[in-house]
Amino acid sequence: MALPVQQQAKYWGIATTVLLIALWFLGDVILPFVLGGAIAYCLDPIADRFEAMGFSRTVSVTIITLAAAVVFIILILLVIPTLISQTTQLVNTAPELFSRLQAALTDRFPSILDSESTVHKQLLAIGEAIQSKGGELMNSVLSSAIGLLNVVILLVIVPVVAFYLLLDWDRMTARIDELVPRDHVETVRMLARQIDNTLASFIRGQGTVCLILGTYYAVALMIAGLKFGLIVGFIAGLVTFIPYVGALVGGVLAVGLALFQFWSGTEMVDGVAVAHGTNWLRIGIVAGIFGFGQFLEGNILTPKLVGSSVGLHPVWLLFALSVFGSLFGFVGMLVAVPLAAIIGVLIRYAIEHYKGGRLYRGLSTDE
């Protein structure tokens, strides 16, 4: 005989509470295991394909690990130093860019930005804040990133955890299946398949889209001559998982930087001030890069790699990232997407049963 509904709800509530408490108190401790688990989950289909080709699980995981190590070394040697350098230059250049914006607005809208206007005073205050806090902000971001993802975690713990989880992934899932209460095993399996489909479509598919678009934006902007093309492409690719936000944020940032870089003015070349006109062609190329990227994402990449229906609404994603990020910090942001997918599947399942129940259908409705 199955346990009463009230008792089952109590047990599942206790399990959920324990999970949230663990996230709250062990956030920094479980970070490498969360990262390792996410990597193992994303790479498991590749390992399964190697196994289908006749390789053993150990050989498959070893091949994947060696390939990942090569990619990581290439990133360390070629991409990451340039990314850090451009980020630092962008923060250091921000006060100058803001001053040029203020000067341009003052020239074009003198009646609005007079010395006594509220807008003018606010712009001055923002400029002073950027000048005083820009370097401090950069240093704090870098120190926080180093403290959060230190070299030991990146180079040792996360790869080791990912390796062993990937090696034992099938055995672990089978063991978890054995521990599921037998009265609910079919329901849990059905929900697990739906959750896996959602996560596979979103995390694996959307992750691939982010990687492709981020690489495209970075390479194309650098070829176009934009000074901070790599960091802009990195930012645009990073937030592409939220539909339209990546293109909007990256596009506004890139076009804004292009306007400052290619707008008419003077620049020092070998100690000599050289005047140049507005290069509308370069500005148009930068805008066109993001226009084509949006077309590529909406018509080719997302339909092919993610699918037409994932079940994760952009607003729901933003809400989950905000809530879990504020409650559990960086670890909360990492687990926000999978937890949002799980909660979404459970809510849809609950709504389906609610619509089939007496509460929704009423006493007069035939069963």
Image (tube, rainbow, N blue to C red):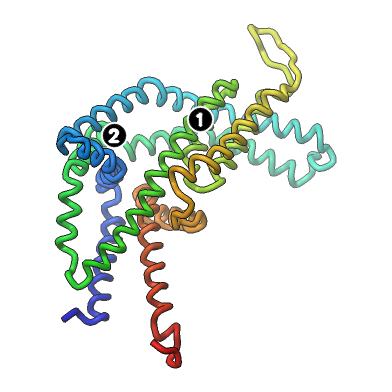
Residue 364 vertical position relative to residue 188 in the rendered view, above or below = below
* Disc 1, SS: helix
> Which of the two discs, 1 and 2, labels the residue nearer the N terminus?
2
**Rendered image quadrant of residue 293:** top right
Q: Quadrant of the N terminus?
A: bottom left
Residue 239 image point, x, y percent: 49, 43
- Count of marks placed on residues: 2
Residue 208 or 27: which is nearer the viewer?
208
Q: Is residue 103 above or below residue 24?
A: above
62 or 261: nearer the viewer? 62
Q: Amino acid at mark 2?
A: Leu
Checking the image for residue 216, the label placed there is 1
Where does residue 268 sit, x and y in percent of width and height? 66, 13
In screen coordinates, is 16 left or right of 89?
A: left
At 60% across and 37% down in the image, what residue appears? Answer: 251
Please state if 157 lies on the left or on the right of 142 as rendered: left
Residue that sits furthest to the front in the current view? 53
Q: Residues within 10 Å of mark 1 (few under 14, many from 20)?
A: some
Answer with left or right where residue 24 lies relative to residue 309: left
Q: Residues within 10 Å of mark 2 (few under 14, many from 20)?
A: few
User: In terms of depth relative to the viewer, which is nearer, 96 or 125?
Assistant: 96
Report the Cα–Cα distance between label 1 and label 2.
Answer: 25 Å
Secondary structure, mark 2, is: helix
In the displayed structure, 228 sits above or below 296; it is: above
Point out the frontmost of discs 1 and 2: 1
Q: Type of residue at label 1?
A: Tyr
Residue for point 26% across, 36% down? 153
Direction from residue 66 to residue 229 in the image, left or right = right
Q: Position of residue 210 (x, y in %)?
A: 45, 39
User: What residue does disc 2 label?
Assistant: 154
